[in-house]
């Protein structure tokens, strides 16, 4: 007689197969997820296997292995010696370099004026232009004067004129003739008068700007009270404020 297996045998075999494969499938998905995250857990023992990584870098270069970013140079210098083509140097703190006025500067009488000049330019290595503005005079630091209460300093007036020094030709002169429009850039009381605008200096010593100062003891000082101004001395100092121009 032929014997038949119980009908339930086949389902049990199918269930066993399903139970055997399902955990493997879940383990495979878990391993794949861990590997994608950069580490692989092996055998449940806590060991990890590093994944491949890659980085790329760039830097600012000059095409020859050196640095590709830097700063320019900026420096303005002065000369007080005619013909103002040499003798340029730095004097960056008050009182600066002595500027010699015309004869009679220490024996002024009411109505008299004296003159002195200075030239400015950028250095040969300066990479950007400069704008220069003359500030109002202040007392020179460290210079002993005889002007109690600043009376003479307050009484004096000043005019400032500017011209571009030619590369060739005669040196500029600082006299009353220099003060014609539009060369005059400032006029008024010594203690409060600066330039009304700026002057441009080209980079690399490309241009030289000459400044002429006229200091005057006004005629109005010839009064009954003018004796208070006699026998005094002052040493005004002017700042040339320079700003680089991009």
Image (cartoon, rainbow, N blue to C red):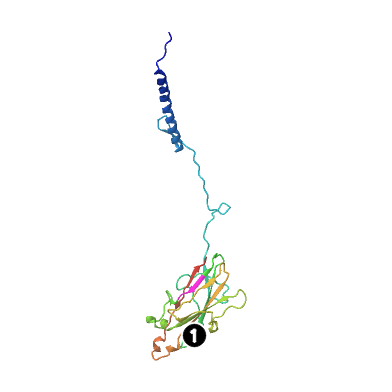
x and y percentages locating residue 58 in the rendered image: 53, 49
Q: Is residue 75 above or below residue 52?
A: below
| Residue 71 located left or right of residue 222 | right
x and y percentages locating residue 99 in the rendered image: 50, 77
Residue at left offset 42%, top offset 19%: 10
Q: Say whether residue 53 is magenta.
A: no
Q: Is residue 53 above or below residue 178?
A: above
Q: Residue furthest top?
A: 1
x and y percentages locating residue 7 in the rendered image: 40, 17
Residue 26, by quadrant, is: top left
Q: Residue furthest bottom?
A: 224
Q: Which residue is mark 1?
A: 113
Q: Residue furthest left?
A: 149
Q: Nearer the viewer, residue 63 or 32?
A: 32
Secondary structure that dominates the magenta span? strand
Secondary element under disc 1, as helix, strand or loop, is: strand
Q: Residue furthest right?
A: 168
Residue 163, by quadrant, is: bottom right
The quarter of the picture where the N terminus appears is top left
Mark count: 1
Q: Nearer the viewer, residue 224 or 132?
A: 132
Q: Nearer the viewer, residue 196 or 93?
A: 196
Residue 234, by quadrant, is: bottom left
Q: Which residues are magenta?
A: 131-135
Residue at left offset 43%, top offset 76%: 138
Q: Residues within 10 Å of mark 1 (few under 14, many from 20)?
A: many
Q: Is residue 243 above or below residue 189?
A: above
x and y percentages locating residue 164 in the rendered image: 57, 75
């Amino acid at each position: 007689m032929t014997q038949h297996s119980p009908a339930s045998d086949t389902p049990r075999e199918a269930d066993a197969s399903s139970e055997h494969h399902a955990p493997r499938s879940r383990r495979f998905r878990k391993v794949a997820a861990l590997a994608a995250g950069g580490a692989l857990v092996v055998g449940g023992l806590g060991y990890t296997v590093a994944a491949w990584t890659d980085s790329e870098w760039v830097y600012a270069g000059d095409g020859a292995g050196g640095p590709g970013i830097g700063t320019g140079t900026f420096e303005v210098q002065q000369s007080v010696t005619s013909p103002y083509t040499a003798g340029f140097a730095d004097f960056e703190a008050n009182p600066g370099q002595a500027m010699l006025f015309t004869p009679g500067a220490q024996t002024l009488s009411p109505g008299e004026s004296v003159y002195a000049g200075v030239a400015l330019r950028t250095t040969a290595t300066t990479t950007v232009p400069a704008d220069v503005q003359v500030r109002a005079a202040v007392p020179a630091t460290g210079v002993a004067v005889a002007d109690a209460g600043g009376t003479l300093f307050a009484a004096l007036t000043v005019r400032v004129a500017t011209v571009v020094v030619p590369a060739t030709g005669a040196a500029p002169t600082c006299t009353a003739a220099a003060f014609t429009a539009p060369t005059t850039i400032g006029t008024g009381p010594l203690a409060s008068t600066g330039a009304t605008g700026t002057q441009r200096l080209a980079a690399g010593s490309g241009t030289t700007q000459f400044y002429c100062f006229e200091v005057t003891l006004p005629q109005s000082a010839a009064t009954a009270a003018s004796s208070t101004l006699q026998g005094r001395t002052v040493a005004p100092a002017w700042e040339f404020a320079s700003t680089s121009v991009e």
